[in-house]
Image (spheres, helix red, strand yellow):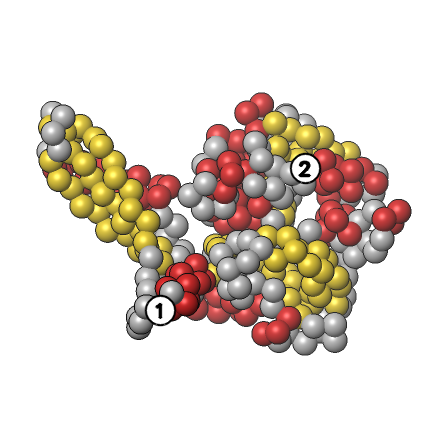
Amino acid sequence: MTAYTATVEVRLKSGVLDPEAETTARALERLGFELEDLRSADLFELDVDAESADAARERATEMAERLLANPTIHDYEVGVAEREP
Amino acid sequence: MTVAVVQFGGSNCDRDTVQALESLGIDAELVWHADGLPEETDGVVVPGGFSYGDYLRAGAMAARSPVMAEVRAAAEAGTPVLGICNGAQIGCEAALTPGAFTTNASARFQCEHVHLRVENADTPWTSRYEAGEVVEFPVAHGEGRFEIGDEELATLEADDRILFRYCDADGEVAPAANPNGSKHNVAAVTGDEDHVAVMMPHPERVSLADIGPTDGQGVLRAFD
């Protein structure tokens, strides 16, 4: 078994309104920053032990499908890296 | 008819719902989620509140709890199931009903009375109303914006699965009458079969004659 950290990044699908991001962008503008747009995402770091990077990715993908993302409004991306156990 | 009102940690409309149902002569009991549905369950309400502190997304945790598998089995066997507010978020997260309820367009918690237009009066939840009738219900939610893909929404509309839409006092479905930015002002929708439904507005809060209007009774009488 190898120690991995899988990352699942969950973001709203393109075109889905993000009122929190809009509010955050407005707050930055009030602080004097200039910006064209702001998107936010949730990042989950999952420490797992698995036989291979593919196996770790598969497990993280299933976690995204079953809980971390809501397919109606979200897209997600999975990444895998080895970690120091 | 005994209606199970499922309590999660963080539910807070559970007792109100039991009281409203009982005031209509409908047997109802609080059921702690970990105890599972009683054998004699003839109806289920998943009530409002903030189950699991709205962690991750409103309703996400409760939707994946074991009792919801029982609720799904009951729904598939024909038992009427109603999700109200947090219960609606749970119902969509559990895929009992389509779409998702997410952050209000205002990014604020909206707590107010709203007008609703009855879209389809030919369901158990709306048969006490007339199609096009305007009723007044309270809403109280931060994540009540109905989101769904355009094609799926078109299918829902073609299949007459929208129960109520937010409207103004004259029954006009206008953007200004939409408290949360819901697509096409959708406030309530059915599952694949019309004995399963979810709604963000609170019928149980407008059902006791002693404290005010009773527009919500019609929804709860589906369990009669």
Chain under numbered label 1: A
Name which residue type carries label 1.
Gly
Image side of residue B23 versus residue B169, left or right? right
Q: Indicate whether B33 appears above or below B117.
A: above
Q: Which mark is residue B14?
A: 2
Q: Quadrant of the C terminus of chain B?
A: top right
Image side of residue B17 versus residue B55, left or right? right
Question: On the image, which quarter does residue A57 sit in?
Answer: top left
**Mark 1 residue crowding within 10 angstroms, few (<14) / some (14–19) / many (20+):** few
Q: Indicate whether A3 appears above or below A20.
A: above
Please give the residue where the numbered disc 1 appears in the rendered image: A32
Q: Secondary structure at mark 1?
A: loop
Camera-nearest label, 1 or 2: 1
Residue B144 coordinates in the image, percent (x, y): 55, 56
**Mark 2 residue crowding within 10 angstroms, few (<14) / some (14–19) / many (20+):** many
Image side of residue B149 versus residue B137, left or right? left
Can residue B192 be seen in this snapshot?
no
Q: Residue at x 38, y 65 (%)?
A: A31
Q: Indicate whether A35 appears above or below A69.
A: below
Of residue A80 and residue B40, the one placed in the foreground of this image is A80
Q: Quadrant of the N terminus of chain B?
A: top right
User: From this viewpoint, which residue is outermost toward the right?
Assistant: B210
User: From this viewpoint, which residue is outermost toward the top?
Assistant: B35
Question: On the image, which quarter does residue B39 sit in?
Answer: top right
Name which residue type carries label 2.
Asp
Can residue B51 be seen in this snapshot?
yes
Of residue B129 and residue B106, the one placed in the foreground of this image is B106
What is the C-alpha distance between the residues marked 1 and 2? 46 Å
Q: Residue at x 75, y 68 (%)?
A: B133
